[in-house]
Image (tube, grey):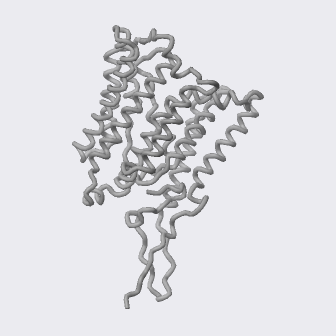
Amino acid sequence: MTEKTSTIDVNKPRGLRQYQWEIFLVVLFLAVNVVNSFLSPYYLTLDTFVSTPMNFLDKAFLVLPMTMIIILGNIDVSVGSIVALTSVLMAVSYNAGLPMPLAMVLALVISTTCGLINGFLQIKFRELSATIITLSTMTVYRGIAYVILEDRSAGRFPSWFSFLAWGYIGKVPFILIVFVLAAIVFAILLHTTRFGRMVFAVGNNKTACEYSGIRTRRIILGVSVITGLMAGFTSLFLTSRMGSTRPNVALGYELDVIAMTVLGGISTSGGKGRITGPLISIFLIGFLNYGLGLRNVSAQVLLIILGFLLILSVLVQNFTDRPRQKAPSKSGKSAAPTHRSDAGSGSDIHGNSA
């Protein structure tokens, strides 16, 4: 008689425990707002919570694809340079006589092409890491922007263009509406579609996926193209908010975006994560920065605080990723340890699962 055995993933968090990192971020967000309310008697108003995100949501559009990139186990440090190059070319083309709607479409085409180039280089030169490749293209894209515009600025956009960053539909900022819609699309794409499942699978074990017949190159290329497209949208909203552009715009955006993503609980080892964490961290860091601005605190203080939070996030991930020993069975035989590649639904304290 054959004895049937069943495997139970004892390491997988259950119930609210799988969301405990997101809950921790929410608690931090509430604490930040409590502190901010003491800094200004006018802080706790609906207008504050509605209008403040207009100052940082242009950067938030990059967090959405960066979540997918880090789940893949990669890093893209060229997104800020793509934003700068796209913004510069849009402004120059408009000042040269191209209608503004066409200049905006051109910006999206250029940014998507930059993402396509990044993806092509990654699948063509597989011996090089994505960080090295995008570090190279970061220099190239930013350099092209400087060659085109040098140290000058470009602008004189039509008045309606400012609506993208500063306009309202009713009492809700237009950029907030667009971001919410984009977040919903990415949540569906990442967590409910076959493409999203493949992203998790490739990030969890790329070699196993290749032997299983999964076209990992298409996944990497697709994510890179999506990243380029979102960088184009970021350039539209950023340029609209500033009213002009220079080659040094979006400088340091890539580090801010990576920090928001990792703080949101996306595992840097790949294969784990939920988009809800980065969404919370966007507003956490944004309102923290706003609160420090109320007291004219140096931006370096924000970097120190963010650095400690990132260290905490990485330490928690490394601690909870350690395999746990299972209790011995009744027959006296010890249970075999569970490896991450064997437990496809394994999770860390962030509740991240593939």
Q: Residue drawn at (49%, 83%), measured in percent from left and top?
A: 329
Residue at far left of view: 124
Q: Quick one: which residue is furthest to the front in this view?
A: 170
Residue 5 or residue 156, whichever sits in front: 5
Specify the quadrant of the image occupied by residue 232: top left
Snapshot quadrant of residue 77: top left
| Left or right: where 97 falls relative to 282 | left
Where residue 153 appears, as percent x and y from the top left, is 42, 12
Residue at left offset 29%, top offset 35%: 116
In this view, the residue in front, 302 or 269, is 269
Q: Residue pushed farthest bottom?
A: 1
Question: Would residue 6 appear left or right of 214 to someone viewing this image?
Answer: right
How many numbered marks, from 0 up? 0
Is residue 174 found left or right of 80 in the rendered image? right
Q: Looking at the figure, which quarter contains the N terminus?
A: bottom left
Give residue 162's position: percent from left, percent from top.
52, 17
Residue 51 vs 341, above or below: the answer is: above
Residue 65 percent location from the top left of the image:
42, 40
- Is 119 or 136 nearer to us in this picture? 119
Left or right of 242 on screen, residue 144 = left
Picture quadrant where residue 336 is located: bottom left
The residue positioned 51% from the left and 61% from the top of the image is 320
> Measured along the vertical axis of the image, is residue 280 above or below residue 214?
above
Residue 279, horizontal then vertical, whole percent: 54, 41
Which quarter of the figure is the C terminus placed in?
bottom left
